């Protein structure tokens, strides 16, 4: 029997200079729906406040500059104070002089299990592991900010990846899956360590070239913008020579595959053939999409 109870979240947040995120948080409890669904609604409201009202950095951000993102939490089961779940995290950023918002991050983390005892105080402390729920959410907040920063400035995301890495290092003491290198080769540990590794620095370069030099310039010179996106893909192609089937390549195309097809199915004409050949090689899982690009 599942215990029916109400979770009350209390988050202690320091004095804020800015809130960087504009995040939509949804908690899906269809698989465990019962007579007391209020617990999940309370969780959704509390996490929404936590993510959006916390200052995750020293950045001074205007309200219209906040990063649009989402966290979709799917509760698979819960029993007493134990929750088994997954979390889909996504983010996007506006493109200069347009109404378009470009996806940057789209990742489904299936190792999102946590416990909560009624009336337990939940407080994010970067120096200690107190809750897997809070640590996972805080980790992805830093990843979102880091990827957004990388899209505006070369290596701009490094301070936020370092903050996420510190969360990962501290959380390893909690015993939950997803924080350790031995769990799998594609988890939170590998995500943040790859983002910081010089071996994968061309991924960070690609984020900057693709967005700032590519998409942001399309309002002035569409052909040049498309050529810059090809250059960004070439960066990933070069990276794949040394690290084939890398986690970060998958992360990139999970967010960008549909957008790339849309960009290169119309004019003006650029070297689509070279682009498509690279795409088939570095992201064969999306071959059916690449076939839609006109050569």
Image: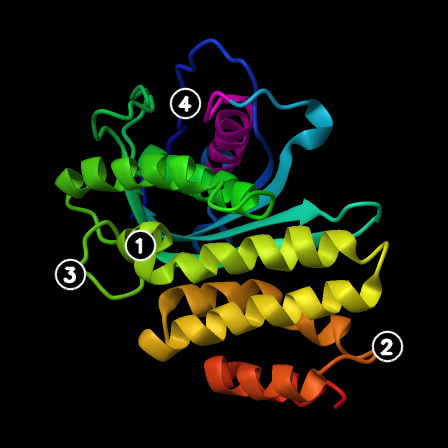
Q: Main secondary structure of the magenta part?
A: helix
Q: CA distance from mark 3 to mark 4?
A: 34 Å
Q: CA distance from mark 2 to mark 4?
A: 54 Å
Q: Which residues are magenta?
A: 40-58
Q: Is residue 151 above or below residue 222?
A: above
Residue under circle 2? 267
How many other residues sit within 10 Å of disc 1, few (<14), some (14-19) or many (≥20)? few
- Specify whether 175 is left or right of 214: left
- Disc 4 vs disc 1: which is toward the camera? 1
Residue under circle 1? 197
How many other residues sit within 10 Å of disc 3, few (<14), some (14-19) or many (≥20)? few
- Disc 3 vs disc 4: which is toward the camera? 3
Task: Kindly identify the residue that appears in the image at 74 percent across and 51 percent down.
Answer: 216
Q: Provide residue 220's location: percent of width, then percent of height.
A: 86, 55
Q: Provide residue 250's location: percent of width, then percent of height.
A: 45, 69
Q: CA distance from mark 4 to mark 1?
A: 39 Å
- Disc 2 vs disc 4: which is toward the camera? 2
Foreground of the two, 14 or 241: 241
| Disc nearer the start of the sequence (2/4) | 4
Q: Provide residue 278's location: percent of width, then percent of height.
A: 54, 83
Residue under circle 3? 182
| Disc nearer the start of the sequence (3/2) | 3
How many other residues sit within 10 Å of disc 2, few (<14), some (14-19) or many (≥20)? few
Residue under circle 4? 8
Q: Is residue 259 above or below residue 59?
A: below
| Disc nearer the start of the sequence (4/1) | 4
């Amino acid at each position: 029997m599942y215990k029916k109870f109400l979770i009350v979240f209390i988050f202690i947040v320091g004095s804020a200079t800015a809130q960087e995120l504009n995040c939509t948080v949804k908690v899906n409890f269809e698989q465990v729906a019962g007579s007391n669904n209020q617990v999940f609604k309370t969780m959704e409201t509390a996490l929404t406040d936590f993510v959006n009202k916390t200052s995750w950095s020293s950045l001074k951000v205007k309200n219209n500059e906040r990063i649009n993102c989402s966290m979709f939490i799917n509760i698979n089961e819960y029993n007493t104070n134990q929750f088994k779940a997954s979390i889909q995290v996504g983010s996007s950023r506006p493109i200069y002089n347009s109404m378009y918002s470009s996806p940057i991050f789209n990742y489904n983390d299936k190792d999102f299990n946590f416990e909560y005892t009624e009336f337990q105080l939940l407080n994010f402390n970067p120096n200690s592991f107190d809750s897997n729920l809070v640590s996972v959410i805080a980790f992805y907040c830093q990843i979102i900010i880091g990827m957004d920063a990388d899209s505006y400035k070369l290596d701009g995301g490094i301070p936020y990846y370092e903050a996420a890495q510190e969360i990962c290092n501290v959380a390893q003491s909690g015993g939950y899956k997803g924080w350790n290198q031995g769990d799998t080769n594609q988890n939170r540990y590998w995500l943040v360590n790859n983002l910081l590794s010089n071996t994968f620095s061309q991924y960070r370069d690609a984020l900057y070239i693709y967005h700032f030099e590519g998409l942001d310039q399309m309002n002035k010179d569409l052909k040049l913008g498309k050529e810059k996106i090809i250059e960004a893909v070439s960066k990933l192609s070069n990276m794949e020579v040394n690290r084939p089937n890398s986690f970060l390549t998958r992360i990139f195309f999970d967010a960008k595959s549909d957008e790339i097809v849309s960009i290169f199915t119309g004019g003006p004409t650029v070297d689509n053939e070279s682009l498509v050949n690279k795409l088939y090689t570095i992201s064969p899982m999306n071959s059916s999409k690449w076939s839609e690009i006109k050569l």
